[in-house]
Amino acid sequence: MSEDLDFDLFIQRMKAKTNIDLSQYKEAQMKRRLTTLRQKHGYQTFEAYWKAIEQDRSLLNEFLDRMTINVSEFWRNPNRWEVLQNRFLPEMLQRGERLKVWSAACSTGEEPYTIAMILSELNALSKTSLLATDLDSVVLQKAKEGQYLERSLRDVPAAYRRKYFEPDHGMYAVSDKLKNAITFKQQNLLHDTFEQSFDLIVCRNVMIYFTEEAKHLLYQKFASALRPGGLLFVGSTEQIFSPSQYGFESADTFFYRRITG
């Protein structure tokens, strides 16, 4: 069997088993990552690796953890979060309605906890439904636990660090107020249907790993999941070119508003 066919067959089998479509990810990055993982266990081919995964659940869990992108920080690109806090969320709150917010591909939880801190400072946490989802059940469990190393808090404003974190045996624990405000849920962005009528969807530093076709699909799905006038907040390397093709207009740098009407 050729090397390409060996990898393609692995992709097909994994999709059938898990509904994860690896062909939607940039091939060179994904193939390099999975080849390293396969060789770590001494398997010469993806065929042999697949047979081992079928027999050993821990290998499948390791694959899922390695395949997903688990890079997250509190307050990543702080000036963009300040725009959200000082402009967009106050605008939404002026309507006087309960907000519906989603942190998509939330990884280990830094992003939804950042959102929760901001909402708390705006006295809006109790008036917001805050959903956080990720493909990886392992990182979701870490997010629910809310325990972080000090270096993860380097961009958290000092006042917020004092208010929302407690030192805990060398770690920092997120306050129960924030944890209780977030619903964590496993979700496959490319495969699953989305809830509707979100005021804000935050999906940052994830799209860069997907193919153009997968990005196109996701932007359409995000647009449909937002209420008219709702916002999509993306990462600093994920500018949407021609946002109007998805029913968006640029609202600010890395913020896109669903066009009304």
Image (spheres, grey):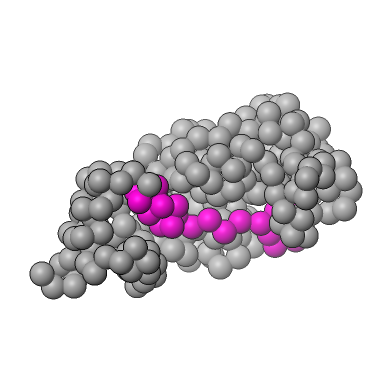
Observer-nearest residue: 255 or 48? 48
Reply above or below: 177 against 18.
Answer: above
Q: Residue at x 22, y 67 (%)?
A: 45
Task: Find out whether residue 221 is within the magenta segment.
Answer: no
The quarter holding residue 216 reads: bottom left
Observer-nearest residue: 38 or 130? 38
Q: Residue at x 46, y 33 (%)?
A: 195
Total labels drawn: 0
Horizontal side of 27 relative to 142 (left or right) equals left
Where is residue 39 drawn, in percent x and y? 33, 68
Q: Residue at x 40, y 44 (%)?
A: 188
Where is residue 87 drawn, in percent x and y? 75, 49
Where is residue 259 drawn, in percent x and y? 52, 47
The quarter holding residue 24 reads: bottom left
Predominant SS of the magenta segment: helix
Q: Residue at x 60, y 65 (%)?
A: 236
Reply above or below: 177 against 86.
Answer: above
The quadrant of the picture occupied by the N terminus is bottom left
Q: Residue furthest left?
A: 1
Q: Is residue 44 visible?
A: yes
Where is residue 29 drawn, in percent x and y? 39, 70
Observer-nearest residue: 156 or 14? 14
Horizontal side of 128 relative to 221 (left or right) equals right
Task: Find out whether residue 61 is within the magenta segment.
Answer: yes
Q: Is residue 99 visible?
A: no
**Which portion, as a residue range, is magenta?**
59-84
Horizontal side of 34 relative to 68 (left or right) equals left
